[in-house]
Image (tube, rainbow, N blue to C red):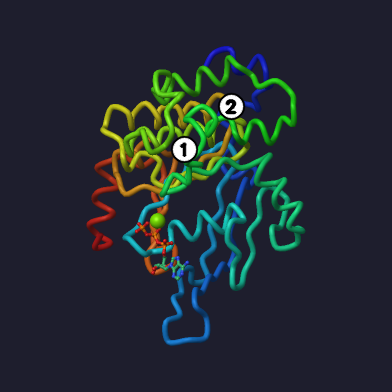
């Protein structure tokens, strides 16, 4: 990642944990299908804070509310009650337009289901947020090349999503989230479809984004090895925070998951 700091001054490396909150959900409840018998309490009064310049893994069984939490943090979905903040912005108090700008300028999101635009090539998908954010200005080609090289897609840039494997589509989705160098990256299982080597490349890159660029990463994962790249691991169950680990190791995470019955 050398050269990157030349184009954007990096905040101090290793910011003290807890110094500033990059994102938080407070007393957050999300009920889907409210009112009927089918109502699901996906988030149940959860409070979680993600310090600036930290890499946090979010773990928990299927259906525990991990994707819902990430979507609500990104303003892609709204809470039933409670508060979400990104930096000093309370998402609930923003207009649709302000929310759109905040998402565009400050958040990079990797969807569990990739959400690529099927009619665009891999390169066009990656540079789409850049095109929106730069409004005619030239992209930083060196950074773009570094992102593309890191995700290992240099020879697939002209392919459309239907012509890419699941793992390749996932790498396009990760590159798209990184390309604008957002303050905060919210990644839903960014390595779930990758073999361990491709996964390690991307996890190492996320780790360096935190250390060298001061970015904040929140990553949902089922994989204890992936969680081992994070500064902390949070464990969700039934829409609540049930445990957390500082400086997690893969073995430590595995033990904790076993203890939680995962
Ligand atoms: N749009 C929706 N409408 C109704 N229920 C939903 C909706 N989205 C999620 N849910 C429910 O909310 C709960 C939490 O879902 P969520 O997708 O957040 O889980 P998750 O922890 O990400 O699971 P996984 O590990 O399988 O991705 C689940 O019971 C799910 O069925
Ligand atoms: Mg999910």
User: Relative to residue 225, is residue 239 depicted above or below?
Assistant: below
- Label 2 residue SS: helix
User: Relative to residue 227, is residue 78 depicted above or below?
Assistant: below
User: Relative to residue 89, is residue 204 depicted above or below?
Assistant: above
- Label 1 residue SS: helix
How far apart are the two marked residues, 1 and 2, measured between alpha carbons? 20 Å
Q: Residue at 42%, 53% (x, y): give it.
A: 234
Q: Residue furthest front?
A: 119
Q: Residue at 33%, 29% (x, y): give it.
A: 200
Q: Between tags 1 and 2, which lies in front?
A: 1
- Whichever of callouts 1 and 2 sits on the residue coming sooner in the sequence is 1
Residue 175 placement (x, y as % from top left): 49, 31
Q: Residue at 43%, 63% (x, y): give it.
A: 65
Q: Which mark is residue 173?
A: 1
* Mark 1 crowdedness (10 Å alpha carbons): few <14, some 14-19, many ≥20: many
Which image quarter: residue 230? top left
Q: Residue at 54%, 40% (x, y): give it.
A: 185
């Amino acid at each position: 990642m050398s050269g990157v700091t030349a184009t954007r001054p990096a905040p101090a490396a290793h910011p003290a944990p807890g110094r500033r909150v990059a994102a938080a959900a407070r007393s957050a409840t999300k009920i889907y299908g409210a009112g009927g018998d089918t109502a699901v309490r996906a988030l149940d009064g959860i409070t979680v804070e993600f310090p600036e310049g930290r890499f946090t893994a979010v773990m928990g069984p299927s259906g525990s509310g991990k994707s819902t939490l990430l979507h609500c943090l990104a303003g892609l979905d709204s809470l039933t009650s409670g508060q979400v903040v990104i930096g000093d912005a309370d998402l609930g108090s923003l207009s649709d337009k302000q929310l759109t700008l905040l998402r565009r300028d400050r958040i990079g999101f990797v969807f569990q289901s990739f959400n690529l635009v099927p009619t665009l090539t891999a390169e066009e998908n990656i540079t789409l947020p850049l095109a929106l954010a730069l409004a005619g200005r030239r992209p930083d080609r060196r950074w773009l090349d570094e992102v593309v090289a890191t995700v290992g897609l240099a020879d697939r840039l002209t392919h459309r999503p239907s012509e890419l494997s699941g793992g390749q589509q996932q790498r396009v989705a990760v590159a798209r989230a990184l390309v604008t160098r957002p303050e905060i990256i919210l990644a839903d299982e960014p390595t779930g479809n990758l073999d361990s080597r491709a996964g390690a490349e991307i996890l190492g890159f996320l780790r360096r984004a935190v250390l060298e660029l001061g970015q904040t990463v929140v990553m949902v994962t089922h994989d204890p090895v992936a969680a081992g790249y994070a500064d902390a691991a949070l464990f969700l169950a039934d829409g609540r925070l049930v445990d957390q680990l500082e400086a997690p190791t893969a073995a430590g995470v595995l033990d904790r998951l076993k203890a939680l019955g995962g």
